[in-house]
Image: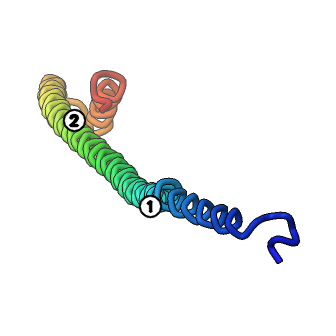
Amino acid sequence: MVEALGISLKDFIFYLINFLILVAVLGKFLYKPFVNALKDRKLTIKAALENAEMTNRKADEKMASYEKRIAKVESEGKEIIRAARLRAENQANAIIGEANEKADELLEQARKEIEREKEKALADVREQIGTLAIMAAERIMEKEIEVNGQDQIIDKVIEEAGAGKWQS
């Protein structure tokens, strides 16, 4: 049957053996290294993907950590601002309280001063009234006049007192 194709059986077996040797040599020196290179490449790619995945996880963790830090810093900043406002309000209230106390003290001092001046003025008025009463009594004594005359002198003294320094 092989001879019907124009090939001798010897040549056919020789070609077959050569083919099998070629397949064996190619399998040993080319196919196995090629398959091994493919396996190595597959492992390298798998390791690179795992490394990339791990790097992404680490990056996500760092991002979450940074976001927490940022939130914490923002919270601390808000707390610092709130505390500063509170201190400023307390200081303002203290300053206003001190100002009110000083104003009250000044008002009280002014009231006391007014009261002293009033007492002094009343003392002066009393002294002047006493002097005028003595003057009126001297005039009355100098002149012995009737009751109507005394009333006129008293009215005149009162009128003089009302027109002069007697008004408070």
Q: Amino acid at mark 1?
A: Leu
Which element carries disc 2, helix, strand or loop? helix
Residue 106: mark in rendering: 2
Q: Camera-side residue: 36 or 42?
A: 36
Q: Is residue 24 visible?
A: yes
Amino acid found under the numbered disc labelled 2: Leu
Disc 1/disc 2 C-alpha distance (Å): 92 Å
Q: Does the residue at mark 1 contact the one at mark 2 (Cβ under 8 Å)?
A: no
Whether residue 60 is visible here, answered yes or no, is no
* Residue under numbered circle 1: 43
Considering only vertical position in the picture, is 117 above or below 79?
A: above
Query: In what quadrant of the picture does the N terminus appear?
Result: bottom right
Name the quadrant containing residue 138: top left
Residue at 44%, 61% (x, y): give it: 43
Taking the spot 82% from the left edge, 71% from the top edge, the residue there is 3
Q: Which of the two marks, 1 or 2, is nearer to us in this view?
A: 1
Crowding near the residue tagged with mark 1, few <14, some 14–19, many ≥20 C-alpha atoms within 10 Å: few
* Tally of numbered tags: 2
Q: Which residue lies at the image location 59% right of the left edge and 65% below the top edge?
A: 17
What's the residue at 30%, 45% (across, down)? 84
Q: Nearer the viewer, residue 96 or 28?
A: 28
Quarter of the image for residue 72 reads bottom left
Q: Is 135 on the left or on the right of 95, as rendered?
A: left
Q: Residues within 10 Å of mark 2 (few under 14, many from 20)?
A: few
Q: Residue furthest bottom?
A: 1
101 and 158: which one is in front?
A: 101
Given residues 96 and 109, the one toward you in this image is 96
Give the position of the C terminus as an image quadrant.
top left
